[in-house]
Amino acid sequence: MRCLVVGGTGFLGGAITDALVDEGHSVAVLARGSTTRRTSADVEVIIADRYGPLGSLKERKFDWVFDTCAYAPDAVRFLLGAIGDGVARYCAISSISAYGTFFRPRLDETETVPAASDRDYAVAAAVPAENRASADAYGSSYGPLKRACEIEAQRILGDRATALRVGLLVGAGDYTDRLTWWVRRIDSVRGAFPAPAPPERPVQLIDVRDAAKFAVRCAERGLSGVWNVTGRPQEFAGVLAAIIDATGSDAEAIWVSETAILDARITPWTDIPMMAPPRPSFRYFMDVSTQKAEAAGLQCRPLRETLIPLIAWDRSRRNVPLKGGMSAEQEAQLLEYQMRPDPLP
């Protein structure tokens, strides 16, 4: 098939490109040229901004389109208008964040999802052109706007549209540094380190290559509608133990209460990657249902198979600072608190 991957030199886009090439498809990627990821010699690279002139797309015909970087419905509308009506499958990368709140476990695709508000559209309109391709630029409007992108694709293409509500993507090349921060911390600084209690805290993640393979599967099988695409929940303690084992580290997790973390003004998710905010609306953020996708063929590899290339990649770039994670001072503060004779529960 003739395929276009929008954002095809990015993290997930690059993995989708690789998966399509491996299956023998003809692939072109649309990119702004701001990333340095190498593509196969067989892949055509079209340098253009999706918000700018897209005349080059009108000269081509595509069977499948994979859109990894639509953050507002006008982005979907503008792209599909340039491509034309000949697309057999448009696969949009949405987000688990579209659900908005997570008061119940095992949310599935039948759940009612909040629509974007006038405020959300105003946020999107105010994002500077140079930041439109950054999820962080949309703040709390990110989830509702992703839902708006799903609706716009379905409005234009009907059953030819697929929306993948992707969870926490991990692997070598991950620009969010969430799992990567724990890998580097455990691999490079040995000894005790603080971790957010309880040890059985659920963590839900998926190797970017597994998400990419499922995206291609949706196109191959004509799977329409909305799909949750992430891994099954794992205990935080198990994830950290797997990192310790894969790195050969002698690090030891010291489990620190949420009370201590919040009292120290240390922010979950940013300062402590993969720790969901301790609010009722996020209680089951890392516990959504993947039953529908698994029944359709989603397969997630063992965590160790994700960690080994991730560790090798990060060891090759230790001069690159990570975006999030605790500082040495924050870690020391939490360890000191937990080592008290009678720490608070």
Image (tube, helix red, strand yellow):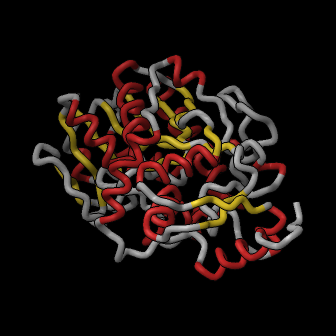
Q: Quadrant of the N terminus?
A: top left
Q: Is residue 221 left or right of residue 336?
A: left
Q: Compare residues 11 and 87 and report the one nearer the observer.
A: 11
Q: Compare residues 217 and 174 and report the one nearer the observer.
A: 174
Residue at (55%, 70%) from the top-left corner? 324
Residue 246 visible from this viewpoint? yes
x and y percent of residue 306 in the render? 40, 44
Q: Is residue 143 left or right of residue 111?
A: left
Image: 233 above or below 39: above
Image: 11 above or below 62: below
Q: Is residue 336 left or right of residue 23?
A: right
Q: Compare residues 158 and 255 and report the one nearer the observer.
A: 255
Residue at (54%, 35%) from the top-left corner? 231
Q: Compare residues 213 and 220 and report the one nearer the observer.
A: 213
Residue at (71%, 32%) from the top-left corner? 107
Q: Quadrant of the C terminus?
A: bottom right
Q: Is residue 270 left or right of residue 208?
A: right
x and y percent of residue 32 in the render? 30, 62
x and y percent of residue 205 in the render? 54, 43
